[in-house]
Image: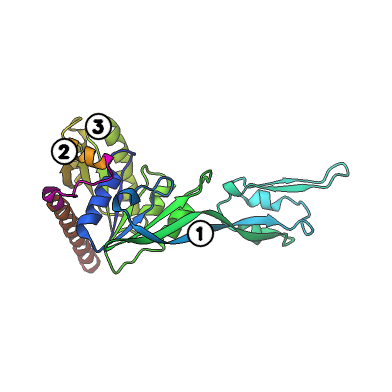
Amino acid sequence: MVIAVASGKGGTGKTTVAVNLARVLGDVQFLDCDVEEPNAHLFLKPDLAERIPARVMVPEIIEEKCTYCGKCAEVCAFNAIAVIPPRGGLKGGVLVFPNLCHSCGGCFLLCPEGAIREVPREIGVVETGRAGAIRFAHGRLHVGEAMSPPLIRQVKKHVDRTRTTLVDAPPGTSCPVINSLEGSDYCLLVTEPTPFGLNDLVLAVEVLRVMGIPHGLVINRCDIGDDGVESYAKASGIPVLMRIPFDREIAERYSRGLIAVDGSGEYAEKFRALYEAIRNRYEADRGHQRQRRHG
């Protein structure tokens, strides 16, 4: 089962929930797909044994073949190519902006002169290793890179469906999040009981409904704020699988690079119960789907 841990906004405690869940389960796979600022490794402390460059293909102009017809710039939906036609006896030119390129290959395929070749460009790295029994992988996007989805997809190539896999998604509801959630069997949404938390939770739930991914909530710092999140969850039929109080001791551990289940049998039991709740919900959803197919 692939369980994604996500949130509509940053700072809700998404990674906190993900690493605690991984620690109590032990023999799982953990993928940190928040490639712009990965931090799960700070808490799980894996031994990163392998470092794999992550590359995408971008166009390179073969000047001696190019006629500056402008077809490549015309087909590029992302303005990654600009063509300067010949004028006044001056030779034309082609500018390629690799940071804007989405590696769709359209310019390469449609160039009438065959004047474009694709070359690899490194955008980051994928690091893999182990943290005890936990199989760990994360991506690190190079500073200055504009697009994280290609790197997220390369991290997710490491998904092993023969074991429980936890995917720590980036915050928000944009393309990186959708790429991280894709293929998940269940999504655990971590939120906080504030107006901002509720606003972004609603957006995240809408994304999951469109993607058809079953989901439940963890309400972090549940004893502050208001009851807006609880009311929304009840009205929308979204199960609240865990409530975590505002606990100074957890915050102090976190500041030292420790997590809630370290030395706390109470929280270890709570996170094991969270996993059981997810598994039961997932199995129930699969049962309902089978009934609809054969009903």
Circle 3 residue? 194
Secondary structure beneath dot 1 equals strand
Task: Please give left or right for residue 31 compared with residue 281 in the image.
Answer: right
Per the rendering, the mark at residue 245 is 2
| 3D distance between C-alphas at marks 1 and 2 | 41 Å
Secondary structure beneath dot 3 equals loop
Counting other residues with Cα less than 10 Å from the Cα at mark 1, is it few (<14), some (14-19), or many (20 or more)?
some
Q: Do callouts 3 and 2 mark residues in contact (Cβ within 8 Å)?
A: no
Query: Which of disc 2 and disc 1 is earlier in sequence?
Result: 1
| 3D distance between C-alphas at marks 3 and 1 | 40 Å
Residue at left 29%, top 40%? Answer: 201
Instruction: Name the quarter where the C terminus is drawn.
Output: bottom left
Query: Which of disc 2 and disc 3 is earlier in sequence?
Result: 3
Amino acid type shown at disc 1: Pro
| 3D distance between C-alphas at marks 3 and 2 | 14 Å
Residue at left 28%, top 45%? Answer: 257
Q: Nearer the viewer, mark 3 or mark 1?
A: 1
